[in-house]
Image (spheres, rainbow, N blue to C red):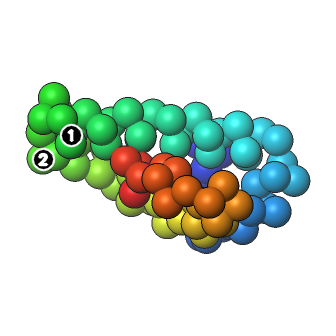
Amino acid sequence: MLVQSLPDGVPLSGLENDPHALEAAHSIGIILEALGYSVFCGIVPLQIVDELVGGVVRLAWRKLNVYVEAERQRSGSRKSWEWFQ
């Protein structure tokens, strides 16, 4: 997993300068956004998500949280990546 190899809190420039890393981050973000929304809607129980991919989700957030906050500031929307978080 490319995202796993990123440094914790990779900055915006760190991803934007590497198209493969940026694509991987967006792919992970889209998947986890859908999963987070599915938990919110009650489609998938949180306990199941935690048991199956909880560690991966926490790792991905640790890697991408600085990038996500920069994206939110740039877009002016606090809702970007909200279900991933």
- Where residue 25 sits in the image (x, y, percent)? 62, 45
Report crowding for label 1: few under 14, some 14 to 19, many 20 or more residues within 10 A (C-alpha): some
Q: Quadrant of the N terminus?
A: top right
Q: What amino acid type is highlighted by mark number 1?
A: Val
Say whether residue 6 is visible: no
The residue positioned 79% from the left and 61% from the top of the image is 14
Q: Is residue 12 above or below residue 80?
A: below
x and y percent of residue 69 in the render? 58, 66
Q: Within 10 angstroms of label 2, few (less than 14), some, or many (20 or more) residues?
A: few
The residue carrying mark 2 is 47
Disc 1 element: helix
* Rendered-image quadrant of the C terminus: bottom left
Is 20 placed left or right of 85 in the picture? right
Which residue occupies 31% across, 42% down? 36
From mark 2 to mark 1, how far is it between C-alphas?
9 Å
Q: Residue at x 16, y 46 (%)?
A: 46
Q: Amino acid at mark 2?
A: Gln
Q: Secondary structure at mark 2?
A: helix
Residue bearing mark 1: 39
Residue 71 rendering spot, x and y as whole percentages: 65, 58
Q: Quadrant of residue 9?
A: bottom right
